[in-house]
Structure formats: structure tokens, C-alpha cells
Image (cartoon, rainbow, N blue to C red):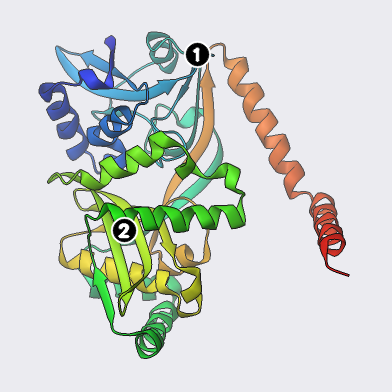
Amino acid sequence: MKISVIAAQELGASLVETWQLIQGNDTALRSPYYSPEFTQLVAAAGRAVKVAVIESQGGVQGFFPYEKDSWGRLKPVGQGLNDYHGLIANPGLDIDVASLLRACGGTYFGFNHMPLTQVVFTPFICFNSASPVMTLTGGWDAYVQRLCEAQNTRSPGILTTIRQSMTRLARDKGQLRFEMHEGSVQVLEVLMRLKSEQWARTVGAANDPFAVPWIRQLMERALSTQGSGFRGALSTLYAGDKLVSSHFGLRAGATLHSWFPVYDLAYAYYQPGLILLKNIAEQGAREGLTEIDLGRGTAGYKMRFKTDLIPLGEGAVSRPAILATAAMTAKWAKASLAADPRVIRLRQWTASRQKTEKAPT
């Protein structure tokens, strides 16, 4: 086996074609994040992205895209924006992970969105999670039937709620208009502004990804990428002439991955985000979408729309192995402490005191 490392910009047409062929032949690699176009987009936005090209039996058998920090730690391409990690390789490729790290000049590789189908990395998984998905195979009616079965109900409450919200929103604010895709940079700017405001309210402005220039550039490049196999998808919902909700995702083949959903807080009462997602799924099913991946997490709307789950793992691999063991042990200890009822009560008490102290007299 031969492993060669090249810059992402050095991926020629032949290698991209091989990558796409490997991805297309394995449904476990259907995510847009496994597409060569995503790796190229992140590199074009200014990141130092590398790709390990794995050859065996006289041909290219797989690819491993990554970034590397000054400490020699390997990271998924576009870490924090990338919901699926690992190898893009032909099934059954037998590769030693330590050899892969060595070839990449790395000492450590941490991951938090690793599908369990990535068998090379499953021995190193320490925590488990899942990504909720909407399975649209067979069309919208087939999806509704799956949703009924998943929720053990004759009529999903989420769809009833959405119908009522659509009626109220149209009555109060004007005729509804849905766009499956808009290519407007101005609309994308509105989405990023609203999302930044949301993050400022919930996690603090310091954690706003859109304050980072390369990420904004990545978004704009993804919007302008409209290939037949991979493209950015900016969907919108208007009430009258007002943009009330928007969503930017990535599409590869028949899979759409939800990336950045947002709505105008002034219209929260009407739940425009739910209306938009329902429209995306219904129209997407007509256009050949078979899956919308809602992304890891247990947010309420994800649980109400999901028909299936994709199991994921979080962990690390290193050389020497003690590095990954120490990192995961520390993470486990931190997670256990955060879940301790005494710690939770202390945080609640502290937050209450702070709120009382800030209240006007």
C-alpha cells in the first residue's frame, strides 16, 4: 500500500473522478461532506487542506482529507462545519490507522461526527450520538407514512401544527412564497446576519463562525457552486414581501444536509422554520431527494421530523496511543461533571443570583 499526501489544490480531474466514483458506489458515503467538492471549497477559502491518496493493487483505492495544526494534530476538513469525517475508500480497504497518521505527518486525529460505517475508526470511538434524518424515498406521501409509523400515530402532529401556522402567517402577514433555491448573495447575507444574532443570544458573539472571514468566503463559494453532483442550496420562505425564514444546506446527489437554518425572530410565533423545512422536504421529494440529514443533535424539531437515525461516534486516535486515551478521559470527566445534579443545581443557583443582581431596583 502506498500513501501519498498532496494539497487539495493538486487534485486533478482524474483523481476527482476516482473520488466521485468511490463515493457514488457506496451509500454510506452519500453525505455532501464526503464529496471532493467540499474539500476543494474549504481549500479555496484559504485553508491549508491536505489529502492522503491511498493506492493499492495498482490503483487509487481511497482518500483521506484533513487539516493539520502546528502541534501535528490532524483535524477534519473545515472542522466545526463538517458533519461527517473519515475515509472515502472502496469497501474492504484494509489500512492501519497509525500508518495513515504517520504518512500524514500527524500524531493525533480527533473526530466527533464519525459514522459507524467507518470501520477503520470504530475501535477508537468513546462516545456515541446520532444524526436524525428524513427519509424521502418514494416521495412525500411515503415519508408521511414512515413518520406515522415512527411516531406510532395516524396523523403526525408536526404536520397539523405547520398547516395551522401557514394559515395564520398568510392571514396576518401576506401570501406565502417558497423558493427551493435562490442564488442571491444578498439573501445569504441576511441569513448570516440573522444566524449571527441567534448565536449572540444563545452562545455569545465570540462563538460566531460568520465573524471568521474564511467561513464567510466558504459560504459564498458554496452558494455559487451548482454542479450536477454537488451544490449549495439556499431555500427561502416569504410572507408578503418579507423574508421570514431561510436555510442553507449542501446537496450531493439525492442527499441534502441541513447546515444553517434560521428565521426572523419577529415572526417566531408563526414557526416559519418548520414551515420552510416542510416545504423543502415536499418539493425536494418531487425533485428526487431521498434524504434530508438534519445534523447531529436532539433539537425538538429534529425529533419531530425524523424517520431514521444515523449512528455516529466521537473519539480520537493517536501515536502513541496514550495521547488519545488522555484526551478522551479528560472529555469523559468533563462530561460527567457537567451532568452531575449538584453541578447543575449550582449553575442554576448562580444564574439566578446573577439575574437578581442585574435586575433594576
Question: How many C-alpha atoms fall within 10 Å of the one at disc 2: few (<14), some, or many (≥20)?
Answer: some
Please give the residue where the numbered disc 2 appears in the rendered image: 187
Image quadrant occupied by the C terminus:
bottom right
User: Which residue lies most toward the bottom here?
Assistant: 171
Q: Secondary structure at mark 2?
A: helix
Residue drawn at point x = 23 percent, y = 35 percent: 37
Name the side, left or right, on which 131 lies relative to 63.
Answer: right
Q: Earlier in the sequence, mark 1 or mark 2?
A: 1
Which residue is at 39% across, 31% downward? Answer: 119
What residue is at 81 percent from the left and 62 percent from the top? 355
To which quarter of the image does residue 331 belong? top right
The percent position of residue 73, horizontal first and vertical second, equals 50, 18
- Please name the amino acid that badge 2 sits on: Val
> 323 or 5, which lies in front?
5
Under circle 1, the secondary element is loop
Q: Is residue 292 visible?
A: no
Q: Are marks 1 and 2 in contact (CB under 8 Å)?
A: no
Q: Amino acid at mark 1?
A: Gly
Mark 1 lies on residue: 72
